[in-house]
Structures are given as structure tokens and as C-alpha cells.
Amino acid sequence: MATSDPTVKESPAVAETGVGTDTILQTRDLRKQFGGLTATDDVDFGIEEGELRCLIGPNGAGKSTFLKLLTGRLEPTAGTIYYDGEEITDLASHERVSRGISIKFQVPSIYPDLSVRENLRIPLQRVEQPSEFDRRTAEILDRFHLAETADETASNLSHGQQQRLEIAMAMTLEPKLMLLDEPVAGLSVEETREIAELLRTINDEDDVAFIVIEHDIDFVETIADRVTVLHQGAIFTEGTIDEVRDDPDVKRIYLGEEQ
Ligand SMILES: Nc1ncnc2c1ncn2[C@@H]1O[C@H](COP(=O)(O)OP(=O)(O)OP(=O)(O)O)[C@@H](O)[C@H]1O
């Protein structure tokens, strides 16, 4: 994609980087050291436009570190990140968000003292004219099943409703890629089912790609197109959930964690 922004480096030719035109995000030799510890070990990870990928792996495998490198929260020790045809390795988090990468960490980052409606107004102000606020708010409240709670203070919502509100806020910015760290941790079975349905709907209807870190394998099975397994900071294997779940080597690394 051509850009006039001098802070964004043009992606080298596809032939040079191997980044396909349908690839929304690609890392090359991405590395993060914490002193002597290699948390991300020269990772080449790619995801297509509109794909829903889950990242799994035992505790300490490097999932959160990898996601933080993609969001810009952590600076890599080495390597490159391409997004939507551009190199974004040196971009700040907020610049990545402006380009369509939405980031959601485990703890909902909503404004607890504001109402649901007021929370939605905050991202809407970045993208809509004031005359459109009421119409767009009503649309979003309806789509994300939040209409009944519109005037409720956000801190009074259930954990599942708060997660839904945060996803709704992210969607107002029309992202192309959403990065989610354990979106259903601590949710009830019913809330987990609702979030799974919501992510699949957004993925299908809005063609948003997802990278989701998740420990709940049943949830992963419900939502993922493909799964990447991380182990000791590196990609251990990739495949469908069935391929990965039945892989004896994957079972071995998870068992190793329990020893
Ligand atoms: N800020 C940090 N400073 C030093 N070491 C860190 C830091 N963050 C993570 N690590 C280490 O990097 C490795 C990978 O951690 P990370 O949190 O990315 O793994 P994870 O797969 O997300 O684990 P979990 O599933 O338990 O959340 C671990 O050994 C961890 O202790």
C-alpha cells in the first residue's frame, strides 16, 4: 500500500520479504530478550486478512510477550513486523491503533465511572461527526446487545458485559486486526459462549482478522480457523485445532509443564 507518511517504511517487494499480498500481518525473525532470557525466539509468524488465529502454548511459552511486541508495548531486540503492506516495527502503539490494529488485554480498559453510552462516545469522537453520535451509538448498542445497559455505569456491568463493551468500543474504529489476550478468562460458560459467538460474527461480517491468546481449548475449538503453538519463545507447530490437539509432541510440551 502506498503511503505519504514519512514515519512508515514502505514494505520491500513481496519477493524480497516473502510477505504475500493477502497477509495482514507478518513478523520476520522477531526476537525479544529479557537479559539472558529469550522470550521470543526469531519468530516468523504470518496471518491472512480475515483469518481468526489462536495462539496457544504452555505457561511461559512467550505468548503475551509476542502479543506485546505486535502492539508496540514492548520493543523487539531484533526483527521486523509488517502490517498491511507496511513495516510497523518502530511505530508507537497509538499509531498502530490508528492504522487499524485493535488491542485488548485481559483487564477490560473501559471507563468504570462512565455509563455504557458515554464509554462508546469516547472512540466515536475520533471517527464520527457529532451529528452522527446518537445514530451510531444506538446502532452499536443494538449490535452488541448492550441497549438495556446503555445508561448503566460501566463498573456495574458483569465481567462478560464489560468485555463486550470493550470489544464494541474497539469496533467503532473499524479495525482490520484485533489482538486479544485471554478474552474469556474468568467468564462463565454462558458468557464465554457469547464472546465466542461475537468474535465469530465480527470475523465473518466485518472481515476482521484476529490473533487470540487463549488457554481454554474448548473456546479455541469454537472460534479458531488455525492455531499456532508457541513453546520456549518459538513457533512449535501450526495447524487446525484437530491437528494440533492430536499431535503427540504438543501433548508432550503441555505435560512437561506439569512435571
Ligand atoms: N518484563 C519481563 N521481564 C523479564 N522476563 C519476562 C518479562 N515478561 C515476560 N518474561 C519472561 O518471558 C517468558 C515468556 O513470558 P510470557 O508472559 O510471554 O509467556 P506466556 O506464554 O504469555 O505465559 P502465560 O501463559 O503464563 O501467561 C517467561 O519466562 C517470563 O518469565
Image (tube, rainbow, N blue to C red):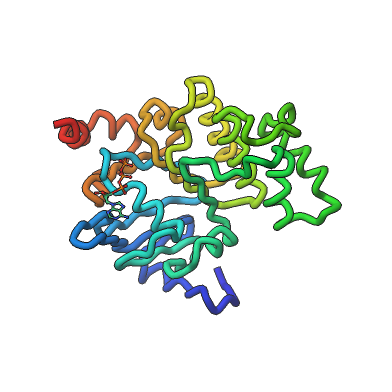
Q: Quadrant of residue 78?
A: bottom left
Q: Nearer the viewer, residue 49 or 111?
A: 111
Residue at 33% x, 43% y is 228
Q: Nearer the viewer, residue 74 or 177?
A: 74
Q: Nearer the viewer, residue 259 or 205?
A: 259
Q: Is residue 78 left or right of residue 145?
A: left
Quarter of the image with the C terminus is top left
Residue reaching furthest to the bottom: 6
Q: Is residue 98 left or right of residue 222?
A: right
Q: Quadrant of residue 241?
A: top left
**Residue 134 at what x, y percent from top left?**
82, 44
**Residue 113 at what x, y percent from top left?**
66, 41
**Residue 19 at what x, y percent from top left?**
40, 62
Residue at 32% x, 66% y is 79
Residue reaching furthest to the top: 190
Total count of labels: 0
Q: Is residue 121 above or below residue 222?
A: below
Quarter of the image with the N terminus is bottom right
Q: Quadrant of residue 72?
A: bottom left
**Residue 148 at what x, y percent from top left?**
73, 27
Q: Is residue 254 left or right of residue 215?
A: left
